[in-house]
Amino acid sequence: MSALPGFVPVVIVGAGPTGIAAATKLAQYGIQCLLLDRWVDVYPQPRAVHLDDEVFRLLAGLGIAEEFAAISRPARGLQLRDPSMRVLAEFRREGDETANGYPQANMFDQPELERLLRNNLKKYPEAVLCGNAEVVEAVQISTDRARVTVQDRLSGEQHSVQARFVLGCDGANSLVRKAIGAHMNDLKFQQRWLVADVATDADLRQWDGVHQVCDPDRAATYMRIGADRYRWEFRLREDETADTYGTLSALYPLIRPWVEQVAVDELELVRVAGYTFRAQVATHWRQSNMFILGDAAHLTPPFIGQGLCAGLRDAVNLAWKLAGVINGWLAEAVLDSYEAERKPHARNLIRFALAVGAAMTAGGRAGDLLRRIVVPRLHLIPGVRDKIVDSATPPLRGSELVIRSLRLRQLAGTLCPNPLMLDGKRFDEIVGQRFAVVTAVPLNPSQRDDVDRAGAVVITAPPGTTLAQWLRTGRASAAVVRPDRTVLTAGRTLSEVLDAVPVFAPR
């Protein structure tokens, strides 16, 4: 561990995807940050395997869209199956892109993603990643200073660094969470599952989507995550552990329904691990200048593949706000919006995951009726069918940076689309790290001056374009879009919209 600075604006504890994403976004705004992790390299074992189009869009904003596309593959939908592998319901995803500009469901290998994120971080000298650095203490020492004590895992020496802000991206056993006096609220869910990854060049001849086996005795999930990589997850029984299935011969009876047309010697067991799936949300996510993100703030069962997604959303939501505060174009009070926006959103997705888990694993008469009568008919209900394959997540609730009106069809709190514009670039490429004013009506000279002084970009939405249709659907003629692509506010007149945002308000 090289010599550490005495002070840095932001210290980030934990260099998993959430920590790296936060560091990258801060660096894109020119903010110096120190990223500390107890390991030198990426954790080599596969964990998360799915992210949605919204989070793909976030990765594009970090600068790795093409690289991620090269290591991922779209999932074409979901099948719900009974214990005998009969298909109860099938939900297909058609087309490769959504309003966000990317496939709805993307399968990948987490170590590959983390290597991309780390390599990309090297482009930004403002962000320094320090491995073999175990944080042993984080403490607030004043209203605008925190001290982080780091131990070199090789030499045992300890060093202290002061920071204006500390971000705890340090996982389920977060030291920073303890430092801010938070604890996890349990949402009454806990199950032990077996996770197995297998590699093979053979064609398994399976439907190219996610398979969910709905069975209270042995619920299971199957996913193809790469050209030659496959993932299975099985609920463990009381008398079983991951060691029970530590060899391919022991695992084979479980995966046989998917691989019975392939010779056993064509299969390579990459790893087998046991996990306890939990549903938990931290009591609070901030104390003064210290924050928690990702698994430090929330844990979700994997049934809808949103665990890693939630952490990356946390990182991008908070990082641009911190940059605004540090650079002086946002008041520090806006940092309250981080928990106000992200906590309800994370909780909603956890509850959705629990509902899917109940369909898969609930026992008793109610569970049997759910699988035998309700589940097979889900695909016949248009609204439900669309919701299951729709990757759109709930809008953010109102905050100082989500200004909502009383009208229906709110745009505030939702994501602005990311269409291809007339010059062949996407909306996000044009806007970059700035605010945007999307408008169907022209700005007058005074309004143009206000927007220019705020460093925002004006995006005109001509009739017939994707953005014009989006505004019309929201009964708006203009909208202010934040740097994280969330709509800050929208309204029927341009003046109404600009006056609602302090940075654009008349002087």
Image (cartoon, rainbow, N blue to C red):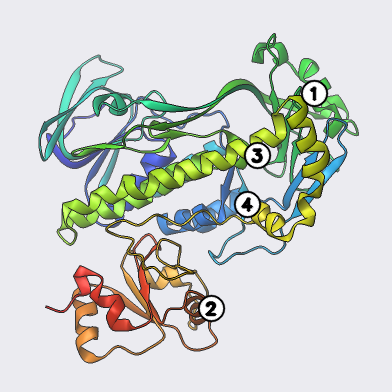
Query: Residue 141 location in percent, x, y?
Result: 10, 30
Rounded to the nearest angstrom, the CA distance separating label 3 from label 2 is 33 Å
| Mark carried by residue 254 | 1
| Mark carried by residue 356 | 3
Helix, strand or loop for disc 4: strand
Quadrant into which the N terminus falls: top left
Q: Would you say the residues marked 4 and 2 are in contact, meaning their CB atoms lie under 8 Å apart?
A: no
Task: From the viewer's perspective, tell me whether residue 440 is left or right of residue 253.
Answer: left
| Mark carried by residue 105 | 4
Q: Earlier in the sequence, mark 3 or mark 1?
A: 1
Query: Residue 389 location in percent, x, y?
Result: 67, 54
Rounded to the nearest angstrom, the CA distance separating label 4 from label 2 is 22 Å
Residue 8 placement: quadrant = top left
Quadrant into which the C terminus falls: bottom left
Task: From the viewer's perspective, tell me whether residue 218 is left or right of residue 299.
Answer: right
Q: Amino acid at mark 1?
A: Leu
- Marks 1 and 2: which is nearer the front? 2
Q: Earlier in the sequence, mark 3 or mark 4?
A: 4
Work out whether residue 480 can be spotted: no
For residue 437, above or below residue 225: below
Residue under numbered circle 2: 466
Helix, strand or loop for disc 2: helix
Q: Amino acid at mark 4?
A: Ala
Q: Amino acid at mark 3?
A: Val
- Marks 3 and 2: which is nearer the front? 3
Q: Earlier in the sequence, mark 3 or mark 2?
A: 3
